[in-house]
Image (cartoon, rainbow, N blue to C red):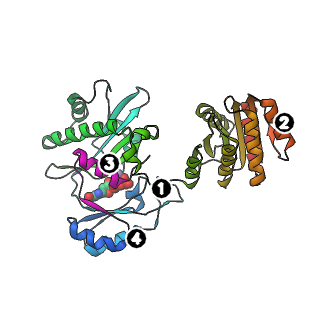
């Protein structure tokens, strides 16, 4: 679950990480009032969307007159914003954050993730922060420092020192205490809120050596939301892909991707393997869809419907290993979906496992046109041939 910048900054502020004063507005007429409460000029007007790269996409405006705060708010609210991270279709801006503008001397990058190789919470710090951090990571990766934290020991002062003193020149002496405090607090937030990401870019240093989190990103591990109930209130379903939202409603594990092969699979591991095989056969998956072990006929029907709602889909590969989910249940679900929505694309089915005979029988006796594959390799070949035609 992703939080908005203003929600993440609220958490930062309460945890002792300095953030600029600001206010969220959802209507243009609230903007004038905001300029009276918030220090300025300058003011910064920022689109609140679950996507980065806003600076490059025109979603962050630094302005110097109160009327400009209003026009900047107007130009963002309700509009479509396209950034390097939204894809060409963009996202709708429902909320705008108006903040006091901070005079920036240096822009640092600071984040915390779980590093999969070491399985450790890992802090990443760079003195070359700002909107070009992706390019820095590619072209001069030596400027990006990583520190693994032993979760059994927790955050130690030497972790901060390793990050701050490993590069010449280190940040100015007057800023070190503030930076160490921000780092310790980022670690604390990351652990206590079950985050998958905490990111501050830029972490700004002012001329008088003050440190401010000018941007804030917090992602929460969905699997930990059962014990982070108060964070659930911060969820904003408007930011989600409508198909992903529909899938969530039916407890289907669905992620939309860019390709044109719809895939319906049971089990996350098998879903990943299926995506790999589709790619190896020269095609691209349109989605990840794990219907899970306990899928019902109705869930399967909904799964097929969701896949078909994506107009880019040119073929569907159903790859089921019948275990807890029996092949006959799957087959009935697919047939029911075909009755409800005309399946306009070739369907390739590979079934194996419990009740596979019954499953194949149900498909054969249906009016459905489909191709049966004996194994996964053949299934992928059939699929890529269908889209190549
Ligand atoms: P992102 O592009 O979505 O990551 O949005 P950011 O919040 O990082 O804003 C993009 C850029 O706007 C930052 O890298 C800063 O250079 C600039 N910016 C943001 N807040 C301020 C501010 O208070 N003062 C000034 N001068 N620039 C700011
Ligand atoms: Mn940023």
Comparing labels 1 and 4, the label whose residue is closer to the camera: 1
Q: Which residues are magenta?
A: 2-25
Q: Secondary structure at mark 3?
A: strand
Label 3 vs label 2: CA separation?
A: 57 Å
What residue is disc 1 on? 239
Q: Nearer the viewer, residue 135 or 90?
A: 90
Assess disc 4: are there few (<14), some (14-19) or many (≥20) residues with their C-alpha within 10 Å of its C-alpha: some
- Residue 15: x and y in percent read 24, 44
Q: Callout 1: helix, strand or loop?
A: helix
Front-most of 76 and 141?
76
- Disc assigned to residue 361: 2
Q: Is residue 379 above or below residue 202?
A: above
Residue 75 disc label: 4
Does the image show residue 250? Answer: yes
Q: Nearer the viewer, mark 2 or mark 1?
A: 2
Q: What's the CA distance linking mark 4 and mark 2?
A: 58 Å
Q: Give the residue drawn at x 12%, y 43%.
A: 174
Q: Which label's residue is closer to the chain start, 1 or 4? A: 4
Left or right, residue 308 beside residue 94? right
| Mark linked to residue 201 | 3
Query: Of callouts 4 and 2, which one flags the residue occurring earlier in the amino acid sequence?
Result: 4
Q: What is the distance, in whole Å, between disc 3 and disc 1 at their CAs?
A: 21 Å
């Amino acid at each position: 679950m992703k939080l908005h910048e203003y929600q993440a900054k609220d958490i930062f502020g309460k945890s002792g990480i300095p953030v600029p004063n600001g206010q969220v507005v959802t209507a243009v007429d609230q903007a004038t009032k905001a300029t009276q409460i918030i220090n300025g000029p300058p003011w910064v007007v920022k689109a609140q969307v679950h996507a980065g790269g806003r600076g490059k996409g025109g979603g962050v405006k630094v302005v110097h007159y109160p009327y400009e705060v209003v026009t900047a708010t107007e130009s963002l609210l309700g509009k479509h914003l396209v950034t390097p991270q939204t894809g060409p279709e963009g996202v709708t801006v429902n909320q705008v954050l108006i903040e006091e503008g901070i005079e920036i001397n240096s822009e640092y990058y600071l984040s915390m993730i779980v590093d999969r190789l070491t399985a450790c919470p890992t802090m990443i710090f760079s003195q070359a922060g700002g909107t070009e951090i992706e390019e820095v990571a590619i072209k001069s990766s030596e400027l990006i420092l990583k520190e693994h934290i032993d979760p059994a020991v927790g955050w130690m002062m030497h972790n901060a020192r390793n990050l701050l003193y490993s590069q010449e020149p280190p940040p100015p002496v007057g800023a070190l205490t503030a930076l160490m405090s921000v780092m310790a607090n980022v670690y604390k937030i990351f652990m206590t809120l079950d985050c998958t990401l905490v990111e501050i870019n830029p972490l700004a240093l002012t001329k008088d050596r003050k440190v401010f989190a000018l941007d804030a990103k917090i992602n929460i591990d969905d699997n930990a939301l059962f014990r982070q109930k108060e964070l659930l209130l911060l969820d904003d379903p408007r930011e989600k892909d409508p198909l992903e939202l529909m899938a969530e409603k039916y407890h289907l594990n669905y992620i939309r991707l860019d390709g044109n092969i719809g895939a319906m699979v049971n089990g996350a591991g098998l879903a990943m393997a299926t995506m790999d095989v589709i790619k190896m056969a020269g095609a691209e998956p349109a989605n990840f869809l794990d219907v899970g072990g306990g899928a019902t006929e109705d869930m399967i029907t909904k799964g097929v419907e969701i896949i078909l709602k994506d107009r880019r889909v040119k073929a569907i590969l159903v790859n089921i290993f019948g275990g807890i989910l029996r092949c006959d249940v799957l087959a009935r679900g697919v047939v029911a979906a075909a009755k409800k929505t005309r399946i306009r694309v070739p369907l390739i089915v590979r079934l194996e496992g419990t009740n596979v005979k019954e499953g194949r029988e149900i498909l054969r006796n249906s009016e459905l046109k489909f191709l049966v594959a004996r194994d996964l390799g053949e299934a992928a070949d059939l699929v890529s041939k269908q889209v190549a035609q």
